[in-house]
């Protein structure tokens, strides 16, 4: 059995402002006093550098990166650029990018490979839609996404998987602990099958309407090694109780 330290990562999506970075000091102080848990915030690109300056030791990350190092890709940001301004992690393959930008598993895998090569901790997101779950195809869908989106492991940086059922994101509907247990066990088995013993060390986060009220219940589930938090990561008041629940679990 591997002991995996919990990771609570906030995904600000297209929210936040310079003024909102004032939340970071409170989150950092709470993370330090809770202890034993890794805490990160991924703000929009424009806020990464000022967030690093005010992070108080929190890890700051990006919400995406390009698979290429540089070149004619208007509007995109490379992994090297994230590293240069102090980012320590990146999220790739979020369902909103898969939907809005048409990112395929192959594209997500290429981004993840580049990010790991730049020593960024890389969170690869997977998750089924509501219709796929209703059709009983959730496990199959996530298996296909894992097979297509996960890069081979590299020694220089950590790969993390985030399971985010699309129907639970931003909806206030969280997957039940039983559903989460089933899916996370399924993901763990897939990771061990592909990566052997190293698959037991990969952290699997749950994401989708995680909040102060449901966090402790989710963290108690086997193979839930933390959370990827959207809406409830925007303020310290909502995010700190999730960090504290992770530290207690
Ligand atoms: P939510 O978003 O917590 O607002 O549901 C989670 C995510 O999309 O990462």
Image (spheres, grey):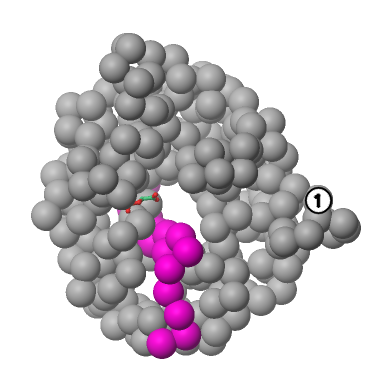
Q: Quadrant of the N terminus?
A: top left
Spot occupied by residue 192 in the image (x, y as percentages of width and height):
48, 24
Spot occupied by residue 46 in the image (x, y as percentages of width and height):
59, 75
Residue occupying the point 40% across, 27% down = 128
Spot occupied by residue 211 in the image (x, y as percentages of width and height):
20, 56
Query: Viewer-proximal residue, 190 or 137?
Result: 137
Visible residue check, residue 174: yes
Residue 131, relative to residue 229: is it above or below? above
Query: Viewer-proximal residue, 242 or 209?
Result: 209
Query: Viewer-proximal residue, 83 or 50?
Result: 50
- Residue 18 shown in magenta: yes
- Name the residue that disc number 1 marks: 68
Residue at the top extreme of this rendering:
136
Residue 53, relative to residue 228: is it above or below? below
- Residue 144 shown in magenta: no
Q: Using residue 1 as the reference point, say whether residue 86 is left or right of it.
A: right
- Magenta region: 3-19
Residue 92, relative to residue 47: is it above or below? above
């Amino acid at each position: 059995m591997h002991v995996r330290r919990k990771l609570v990562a906030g995904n600000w999506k297209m929210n936040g402002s310079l003024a909102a970075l004032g939340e970071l000091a409170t989150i950092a102080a709470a993370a330090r006093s809770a202890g034993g848990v890794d805490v990160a915030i991924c703000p929009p690109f424009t806020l990464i550098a000022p967030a690093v300056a005010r992070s108080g030791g929190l890890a700051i990350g990006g919400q995406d990166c390009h698979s290429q190092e540089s070149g004619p890709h208007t509007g995109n940001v490379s992994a090297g650029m994230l590293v240069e301004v102090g980012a320590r992690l990146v999220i790739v393959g979020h369902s909103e990018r898969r939907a809005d930008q048409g990112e395929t598993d192959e594209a997500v895998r290429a981004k993840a490979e580049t990010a790991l090569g730049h020593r960024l901790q890389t969170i690869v997101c997977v998750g089924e839609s509501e219709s796929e779950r209703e059709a009983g195809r959730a496990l199959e869908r996530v298996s296909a996404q894992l097979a297509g989106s996960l890069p081979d492991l590299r020694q220089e940086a950590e790969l993390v998987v985030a399971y985010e059922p699309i129907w639970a994101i931003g909806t206030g509907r969280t997957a039940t602990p039983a559903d989460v247990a089933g899916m996370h066990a399924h993901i763990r088995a897939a990771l061990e099958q592909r990566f052997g013993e190293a698959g037991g060390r990969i952290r699997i986060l749950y994401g989708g309407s995680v909040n102060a009220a449901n966090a402790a219940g989710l963290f108690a589930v086997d193979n839930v090694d933390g959370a990827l938090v959207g809406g409830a990561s925007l303020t310290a008041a909502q995010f700190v109780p999730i960090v504290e629940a992770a530290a207690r679990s």
